[in-house]
Amino acid sequence: MQNLNSILNYYIEGIMKEYNITDRMEAETILASALVQDKSDIAITDAIEKLVENET
């Protein structure tokens, strides 16, 4: 689970920097929305799904 947390933190911090957001919850919401949309980056979702499968 530590690898998944590292990846999620990386993307959350990137969103916070890119959009100049100081509220971590807002950045998490943006990431969550992107991951569930049909237009989300397939590479990101695939990597996260593989990590989740390996951790469970």
Image (tube, rainbow, N blue to C red):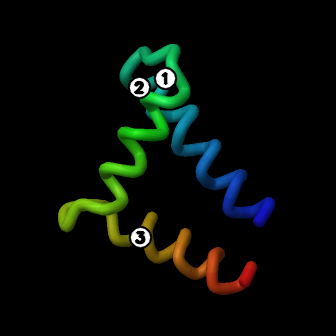
Circle 1 residue: 17
Instruction: Specify the amino acid type for callout 2.
Output: Glu
Q: Please state the horizontal and vertical placement of residue 53, each as a whole percent of the image.
A: 63, 85
Q: Is residue 28 above or below residue 38?
A: above
What residue is at 51 percent from the left and 19 percent from the top? 23
Q: Please state the horizontal and vertical placement of residue 40, each as a whole percent of the image.
A: 28, 61
Say which quarter of the image contains residue 30: top left
What residue is at 36 percent from the left and 59 percent from the top? 35
**Quadrant holding the C terminus:** bottom right
Q: Please state the horizontal and vertical placement of residue 26, each as a whole percent of the image.
A: 43, 28
In the displayed structure image, the side of residue 26 where residue 48 appears, left or right = right
Circle 3 residue: 43
**Sequence-wise, which precedes: disc 1 or disc 3?**
1
In the displayed structure image, the side of residue 46 where residue 8 appears, left or right = right
Which SS class for mark 2? helix
Q: Crowdedness of circle 3 by 10 Å Cα count: few (<14), some, many (20+)?
A: few
Identify the mark at residue 18; answer none if there is no mark.
2
Instruction: Specify the amino acid type for callout 1.
Output: Lys
What residue is at 71 percent from the left and 84 percent from the top? 54
Q: Is residue 39 above or below residue 21?
A: below
Which SS class for mark 3? helix
Q: Please state the horizontal and vertical placement of residue 51, each as a whole percent of the image.
A: 65, 75
Say which quarter of the image contains residue 15: top left
Q: Are marks 1 and 2 in contact (CB under 8 Å)?
A: yes
Residue 10 or residue 27, whichever sits in front: 27
Task: Farthest residue to the right: give it.
Answer: 2
**Sequence-wise, which precedes: disc 2 or disc 3?**
2
